[in-house]
Image: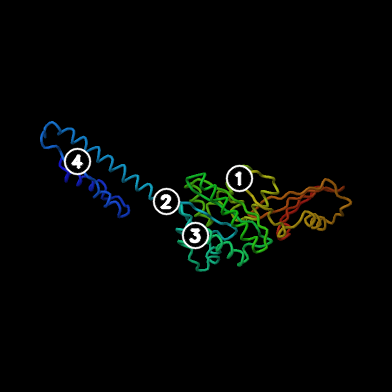
Amino acid sequence: MKNKDIKRKIREEFQDIHMPSKKEKLLEDIQFVQPIQEDKHKNKHFNIKWQLSILTIACICIFSFITLQTPDAYSVSFEVNPSIELKVNNQRRVDDVICHNDDAVLVLDDMDLKNTDLDVAVNAVIGSMFKHGYISEAKNSVLVSVQGSDQEKRNALKQDVATDVKDILSGYSLEASVVSQDYDFSKEREALAKQYGISVGKVTLIQKLINVSPDYDFEDLIHLSINDLNTLIHYKHLNFKSITIDGVESHSGYLTNEQVKSKVLQHAQVTEENVYEYRDDLDVQDNQLIYIVEFTDEFAKYHYKVNAISGEIVSFESEM
C-alpha cells in the first residue's frame, strides 16, 4: 500500500466525523516513513505493519482530540413556582435557557442569558423571581437541582449555586430556605417533567418524597409549591440522604395549629374546656396542604379537614 493510498484511507474513515478545523491539520501532519529501496522485498511486510501502526495511532489521536474537545454538560434548574432550567458547560457558562411554564417566561422578561457566566445568570434569575414576588417572606423556599454525569463535579456545582442563591436573597434582606439536590439523567423523569410543565428537579424531589412516604401519589404533590413541599418535609420529619436543606421554610402563609384548633372548635360549637384527645396533622389532599383534625368531647368524636392556607373547612363529620 502506497503512502498516498494510506492517507486517502484515513480521510475516508474520518470524513463524516464532525470536529474542529484542527482535524485537517492533524491529518496533514501525519508523515509516513519511505520504504528502504535497497531491499524492497525484505522490508515489504515490515513497512505494511509500520504503516498500519501509524494508522492506528492516528485514529487514537483523532478520537482523543474529539473527546478532549467535548465539554461536560450540566443542567441547573431553579423551581419556586416559576420553573427555569439552565444548560451549563464545564466552563460554567450558559449554553441554553429553558422555561418550563408561563411564570418562567415572565421572570426572564426577555433576558438573554446565553453565553453568560453561571454566576451572572443565577443572580439575574433569582433577582427577577424576587422582584416579581415569586420569592418572598411568605414563600422563601427555592429548589436548586443539578444534573450531570460526573457526581463529584455536579455535587460541587450544586453547593456553589445553593450558596449563591442564599447570598443573593440575603442581599434582599430575605432569609431563604434553599433545598438542593443532584441526580443522574433519567428518561422517565424527563418525560414526566415535559408532561407536567415543571423541571426535572421538581419531579426528582417528588419521587424522593414518595420513596420515603409511599402513601402519596405523584398527582397528589405535583401542583404544590416548593414551599409547600418543603413545609411537608419539615412537618413530617422526613430525611433524605441526597437532599440538603439550608434554612427554615416560611410558615407565615399557613394557619398555625392554634388557629386551626380555634376554627374547628368554633364550627363544632365545642368549648376547649370540654375537649380531650385533640390532635391535628398536616397532610396533602387534591394538591393542597390540609390539616387533618380529630377531637372528642363527652358527646361525640369529630373529624375535620381544613385547608392549611385559606382556612376553608374541606370536610367534617361527627360520630355520636
Q: Which mark is residue 117?
A: 3
Q: Nearer the viewer, mark 4 or mark 3?
A: 4
Q: Residue furthest bottom?
A: 110
x, y percentage for residue 293? Answer: 76, 50
Residue hosting label 1: 210
Q: Is residue 177 left or right of residue 145?
A: right
Q: Which mark is residue 71?
A: 2
Q: Which mark is residue 33?
A: 4
Q: CA distance from mark 1 to mark 4?
A: 66 Å
Q: Is residue 164 left or right of residue 311?
A: left
Counting residues from the start of the chain, the first of labels 4 and 2 encountered is: 4
Q: Contact, CB < 8 Å: mark 1 with mark 2? A: no
Q: How is the image coloured?
A: rainbow
x, y percentage for residue 34? Answer: 16, 41
The type of residue carrying mark 2 is Pro
Q: CA distance from mark 3 to mark 2?
A: 15 Å
Q: CA distance from mark 1 to mark 3?
A: 35 Å
Q: Nearer the viewer, mark 1 or mark 4?
A: 4
The type of residue carrying mark 3 is Asp
